[in-house]
Image (tube, rainbow, N blue to C red):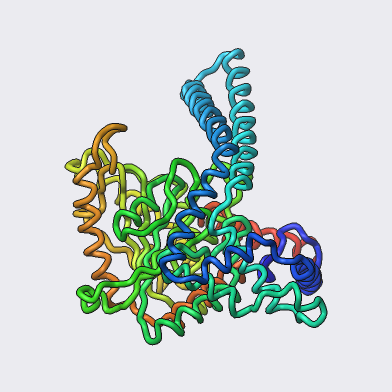
Amino acid sequence: MEQGYRPNREFRTIEHYHDDLKDKMSTLREEQLRTKPGKDILQFIEAVRGTPESRQYFISWFNFYMNDLSQETLGPLRKELRRIQDEARETNAERSKLNDKSEKSEDEEKKLNALTNRDHDLLVQAQEITKKLDSGSLGLEHFLRELGQRFEAQKTLSCKRYGCGHFIKPDLLPEVAANLLMNGYPLEILDGDVGRVPIKWVQAVFKVVASRLKNALVCAIAVLGIQSSGKSTLLNSMFGVRFAVSAGRCTRGVFIQLLKVHEDLRDETNCDYIIIIDTEGLKAPERSLRDDFRHDNELATFALCLADVTIINIAGQTVGKDMTDVLQIAAHAFIRMKEVHIKSICRIIQQFVADLSAEDKNEACTQSILNNLDEAIAAAAKEEGYENLYTRFSDVFNLKRNDEVQYIPSLWQGSMAPPNHRYSEKILKLKQIIVRDLKLSTRSIEQFMKRTTDVWNAVKEENFIFSFQNCVVALRYKTFQHAYGKWVGEMKR
């Protein structure tokens, strides 16, 4: 739960809502403290506190066992989900053919309505299966999430009231997560299930990391893109990290991984560690069914503002409307978040481009999208009173382009074919360019933690813009609000 979020249809004062929310939070924390830690959690803590060698051995077998444990349940569900997705594609293809006709017969109208209803039913079924997949999977992040919940509960409430027998030493919990983070394992900083950053927990983990790394300098790289567009594969290939990859929705929320910079590269990067930020795929089908714009908009804004360099990852030669809508809202939100002063570089990368030599066609597609973004940002800045500061998208987020690495071929050319060597060559060039971008963006771990806190607090306080699909819809709503207020005033007079 977050105190900065306000329900859209709640006819109560914000003070009453905050009081009720605090009471509910306190009740939930009490329930957490009354629950004794499970044997599995205690064994997990003990194993992770061991030597680096034993820790790595344990985590490897832990992940193997967890994957094997959930395979019996998840296998049939994934098969059923693929069947529904295939049927949905066929249904959409038939609908498109009928919609393209300028004149339709009565039978064709009936068929179109039936296809529309069937498409909706398939989306509902896909949503239900996705929920089962999410609840049926269990991994390292769920155990760390449980440690974070217990840590925040113990820090929030006094142990004297509930008995210290159920307590784990509070300082021990962030130490466990810090051990894993420093050994190269991902740490969840934004819970994808509830859309929340557990600030106290994340601060405690970074405090432990900062105490061990002393005066180490860090910089952050994030990747943002539509679901299943190759984001995690891109990071894994570029930096040799271990983010989960598979068909469908893998990453939920936002994860970070700490990557030590080799001594030979420290002068070039001007930092000791690189923080890699992997984000959940945007525009997942189960969210689009509910017109849930808030989650994706908040996540994209958080990642763009947190990272020093953000890779905007696009699948294919064209940048879809879904991605441009999210980027518009993220930039508009940044304009409204006046207290957050950041400098962030963005690079657009288009993967799975078959014809890398078609430069004119590729450039025309990209330029069209950038023009749309510029128009939306100019309109948003004018509405917010910042038309002199922001006239283009690159005025908000420093957008850099390099045609040499913007278009990247597919990693795999076929099911039995070896990896595409051109993919590796492009990724290496992209990595070299990004490393140069990072040189002027280093900071201490404490400063990175402060930036995380400031950005998340600003995202929580921004209650208006995240609810809309794009800037055009948001501006239309504000125009309607002004007109409605004027009409009401006239009627009262």
Res 358 → quadrant: top left
The answer, for residue 455, to whether it is visible in the render is: yes
The residue most toward the bottom is: 215
Q: Residue at x 52, y 63 (%)?
A: 188
Q: Residue at x 32, y 58 (%)?
A: 240
Task: Estimate the x, y position of residue 340 in percent, counting from the top left.
Answer: 49, 77
The residue most toward the left is: 357
Q: Residue at x 25, y 72 (%)?
A: 262
**Where 457 sits versus 255, above or below?**
below
Q: Considering depth in this image, is 161 or 51 the residue closer to the camera?
A: 51
The answer, for residue 330, to whether it is visible in the render is: no
**Where 133 sits versus 31, above or below?**
above
**Where 81 sits versus 160, above or below?**
above
Task: Estimate the x, y position of residue 303 in percent, counting from the top left.
Answer: 46, 64
Task: Estimate the x, y position of residue 459 in percent, counting from the top left.
Answer: 56, 69
Q: How many marks?
A: 0
Q: Residue at x 65, y 73 (%)?
A: 151
Tell me if 390 is positioned left or right of 135 in this view: left
The quadrant of the image that shows the C terminus is bottom right
Q: Considering depth in this image, is 433 or 301 the residue closer to the camera?
A: 433
Task: Estimate the x, y position of residue 178 in percent, counting from the top left.
Answer: 49, 73
Tell me if 452 is positioned left or right of 397 in this view: right
**Where 457 sits versus 348, above or below?**
below
Tell me if 449 is positioned left or right of 267 in this view: right
The quadrant of the image that shows the N terminus is bottom right
